[in-house]
Image (spheres, grey):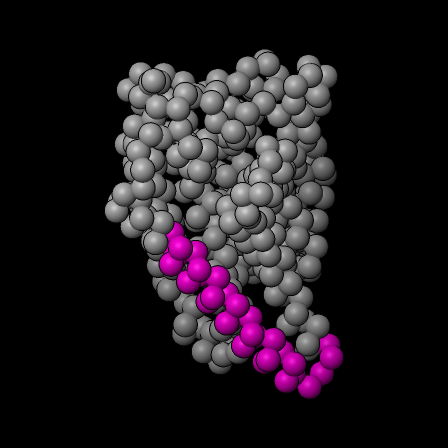
Amino acid sequence: MSNSSSISHFLLLPLADTRQLQLLHFCLLLGISLAALLGNGLIISAVACGHHLHTPMFFFLLNLALSDLGSICTTVPKAMHNSLWDTTTISYTGCAAQLFFFLFFISAEYFLLTIMCYDRYVSICKPLHYGTLLGSRACAHMAAAAWASAFLYSLLHTANTFSLPLCHGNALGQFFCEIPHILKLSCSHSNLRDLGLLLISFFLGFGCFVFIVFSYVQIFRAVLRIPSEQGQHKAFSTCLPHLSVVSLLVSSGTFAYLKPPSMSSPSLDLALSVLYSVVSPALNPLLYSLRNQELKDILRNLITGFFQKH
């Protein structure tokens, strides 16, 4: 029997068993991470350089790109390192840091997506009050609240998780440090502190989800009342990227954490975790840029200007 004080490292789940597949996974992760860095970096550059993109929607999109970059940079480099060097270890402090930063960036993304839903709601349902309700100061306060809430949320969960005694070995059934797999190593039963954090997580997550659903019901009702088909198409085009990103994150994350135990398997758990922790941050820039003409124009100008200089 071992406890947390004697554990110096954890063993992560390898992405593949054979050396050839490990190297293939390394190349795939490298490609996905480079695509995420390029896509999110271009969005950040476009919003920063394009003065007519200094609007609430693009300000929150810049914050979302930062959270995506942070999320993928937290999990992927270690997985790439382990695949390349055929190892599975991560230090105790490294695991704690990875858990904290992953929770920080993924929860910040969820809170930012909720705020972006409010931005779309005000833009479509209350356009005359848009400048008042979403002024620069209000946007800055909402973004700061999202990041601060994510920091406190991740700090509480990380501190609680790593304060539990661990006596069931040090092998994690995941390719990065995640709460459910660390809790499986714990020898303590659920207590009031765990129950309190679980309730906080449920009310935060479910509250944001209900707000998003309610907002989109109002948005769709308002859009369907627009007399012109062109006006409806324009309104829908500003909402579809956000709705796609929310759907991908919420569906994959919810299924991963709330699926029945009978459906659980290492390969399914691994596929779902890759979907919401790796694929989603890489896809978000593509989903937003495909449907937004202003963003595409700025990105085209940036890329053209870069090649002309070189």
Q: As rendered, which of 182 and 152 lies closer to the eye? A: 182
Q: Quadrant of the N terminus?
A: top left
* Residue 224 position in % (x across, y down): 65, 81
Q: Of all residues shown, which one is farthest toward the left?
A: 192
Residue 55 is one of the magenta-drawn residues: no
Q: As rendered, which of 151 and 297 lies closer to the eye? A: 151
Find residue 3 and report its image quarter.
top left
> What residue appears at the point 47 percent right and 66 percent down from the top-left corner?
210
From this viewpoint, is residue 240 visible? Answer: yes
Q: As rendered, which of 180 and 41 lies closer to the eye? A: 180
**238 versus 79 height, above or below:** below
* Residue 231 position in % (x across, y down): 68, 77
Find residue 151 and report its image quarter.
top left
Residue 226 is one of the magenta-drawn residues: yes
Of helix, strand and loop, which mostly describes the magenta segment?
helix
* Residue 100 position in % (x across, y down): 38, 36
> What residue appears at the point 69 percent right and 43 percent down from the top-left corner?
303
Q: Quadrant of the C terminus?
A: top right
> What residue appears at the point 63 percent right and 33 percent down from the top-left corner?
267
**86 versus 290 height, above or below:** above
* Residue 167 position in % (x across, y down): 35, 23
Q: Of all residues shown, which one is farthest toward the front?
A: 262
Residues rendered magenta in the picture? 201-230
Q: As rendered, which of 201 and 144 lies closer to the eye? A: 201
Find residue 205 and report its image quarter.
bottom left
144 sits left or right of 116 in the view: left
Total marks drawn? 0
From this viewpoint, is residue 281 visible? Answer: no
> What residue appears at the point 40 percent right and 28 percent down from the top-left corner?
185
**34 versus 14 height, above or below:** below
